[in-house]
Image: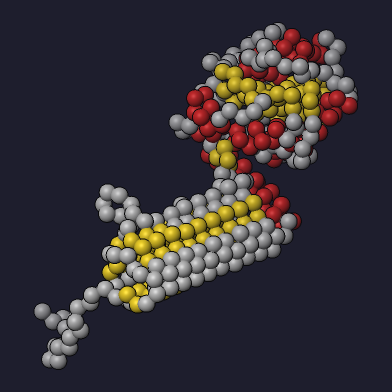
Amino acid sequence: MLHHFSTLQVIILAAGKGTRMTSVKPKVLHNVLGKSMLEHVLHTVEDLQPESVSLIAGHGIAQVKAHIGEPENLTWIEQKEQLGTGHAVLHAEHVPTTADLVLIVCGDTPLLTSETLAALVNAHQEKHADVSVLSALVDNPQGYGRILRNADNQVQGIIEEKDASAEQRLIHEVSSGIFCVNRELLFACLHQVDNNNVQQEYYLPDILPLALAQQKTVQAITMQNPDEMLGINDRFQLSQAEAIMQQRIMREWQKKGVTIEQAETVRIEASVNIGIDCTIRAGSQLLGATHLGDGCTVGPYSIVQNSWLADDVTVAPFSHLEETSVGDKSSVGPFARLRPGAKLDEGVKVGNFVEIKKSVLGQGSKVNHLSYIGDTIMGEHCNIGAGTITCNYDGANKHQTMIGDRVFIGSDTKLVAPVQVGDDATIGAGSIITKAVQNDGLTLSARPEQRHVKDWIRPKKGDH
C-alpha cells in the first residue's frame, strides 16, 4: 500500500558489521527469501513516498553500493567509525532536504511493513509530538532497550539492556529502534548526547531525556505485531525472519486464489508473482523474479527460478527451470531441466529426462524423453524422438542447430552442429546428421549392415 509523506526524510542505519553472522558479507546484504534484508527495508520505506532517503553505511560500503546500485532519491552516507546509533544519525545532519520530520529505521529489520511505519508517522503528526518511538509489548524482552515510563504512564526514556538494572530488565515494553522526530530537535539533541555508558557509544535513544528537559512531547506508539521489529544479528534469527515472512507470503497468495499443498514444505520467495487458480504442490520452490500466469501447476518437488510461465502451464514432479520462458498450455517434466535461455512457445511438451539449453521450441513441438537440445532454433509442430542429441560443442565453441517446421526426428539421432534441417523433413532413427537435411522426404545416415551370428552363446554370470 502506497502512502505519501512529502515532508519526511528517512534515515536507514546500515553501517554495522554483523560480527555474529560470521561472514565476509555485510550483515544487511544477507538474503531473506531471495532479497537482501536491506532491499526489503528500502522497498518498505519507498512505499511511504518520502521526500528523501538517506542510507548510512560503513562496514563493506563498497559491497553494499554494488548490491543496491543507485536508486532514485537515495543519498549515500559513509560512517567510517561505528560509534553508536546517535553518531550514525548525526552524519545525516547536512543532507540537503526540505523535510521537517525524520523517520529513522534499521537496515536489518526486513519484516517491517509500510503500514506500521505510516501509523507511527501519522500518530506523530496527529498528536503534535516532538519525538515518537515505535515500541512493542513482548513476552521475552531480552536484548532490547526497555521503555521507561513514570507513574503517569508518560515516556521518560529508553534504557539499553546492558545499562539496565535488574528491575528495569523486567519491563516488557521494548524499543524497536525506530523513531520519528522533528528534524530540528533531532540534531540539536544529538549534539548534546554523550557516550557515558557501558558500550561507550552515542545512543540515539538518549535524545529522549534531552527533549523532555526542553518540555517537548515524547511518546511511544505500540506496534500491533512485534514480529515486525525482529532485528537480525545471526543465522538463527535470519531463519526465524524467513519463517515469519514465508508464512506472511503464503497467506497473501492463498487469499489471492493460489492453492499451496503442504505449505510447510514449499518455498515462495518475495519477488515471485502468481496468478489465480495456480497449484503449488509439496516440496516445490518458486525463486527469484519468477512469474506464474493463471491456472499453472508446479510440482511436487520442482524448482522454478527467475522464469516466466504463461497461463495453464504444467511443471511435473522433480523438474528444474532456470531463467526460462514457457508459453500457454505447455508442459514440462517430470525430471526435466530447462536451463538459461530456454524458450518454449505455446503448447510445447518437454517430457521426462529432457534437457533444454539456450533454445527456442516452436508452437506445438514435442521433445518427450531422454533428449538434449542445446543452442537450437526449432520450428512449430516438430516431434523429437527419444535419445536425440544436438551436438553443439566441439570442445572450444558452441554451434547452432536449425530445425524447420513439422520435422520428425527418429530416436537416438545425433545432430552435429552447425547443421540445418528443412521443413517437413523426417530423419530415421539412429542417424548421425552432419550435413544439411533437405525439406520433405526421409533422410538416413549410413548404418552398419545387420548380421546374425547363429552359434553365438550369451555369457552367463560366473563364466570366465
Q: Residue at x 32, y 75 (%)?
A: 443
Q: Is residue 281 above or below residue 451?
A: above
Question: Is residue 393 something that shows in the picture?
Answer: yes
Q: Residue at x 78, y 12 (%)?
A: 185
Question: Residue 200, image x and y in percent?
Answer: 59, 14
Farthest residue, direction bottom? 454
53 horizontally vs 305: left or right? right
Q: Please tell me which residue lies in front, 292 or 165.
A: 292
Q: Please tell me which residue lies in front, 452 or 28.
A: 452
Question: Residue 462, image x and y in percent?
Answer: 16, 81
Colouring convention used in this rendered image of the protein: secondary structure
Question: Is residue 411 something that shows in the picture?
Answer: no
Q: Quadrant of residue 286?
A: bottom right
Which quarter of the image is occupied by the N terminus? top right
Farthest residue, direction top? 192
271 horizontally vs 113: left or right? left
Farthest residue, direction front? 439
Which quarter of the image is occupied by the C terminus? bottom left
Q: Please tell me which residue lies in front, 245 or 213.
A: 245
Q: Is residue 424 above or below residue 213?
A: below
Q: Residue at x 51, y 29 (%)?
A: 66
Q: Is residue 308 above or below residue 119?
A: below
Question: Residue 160, image x and y in percent?
Answer: 67, 23
Q: How many marks?
A: 0
Question: Residue 314, image x and y in percent?
Answer: 57, 66
56 horizontally vs 336: left or right? right
Q: Quadrant of residue 298?
A: bottom right
Q: Residue at x 50, y 51 (%)?
A: 323
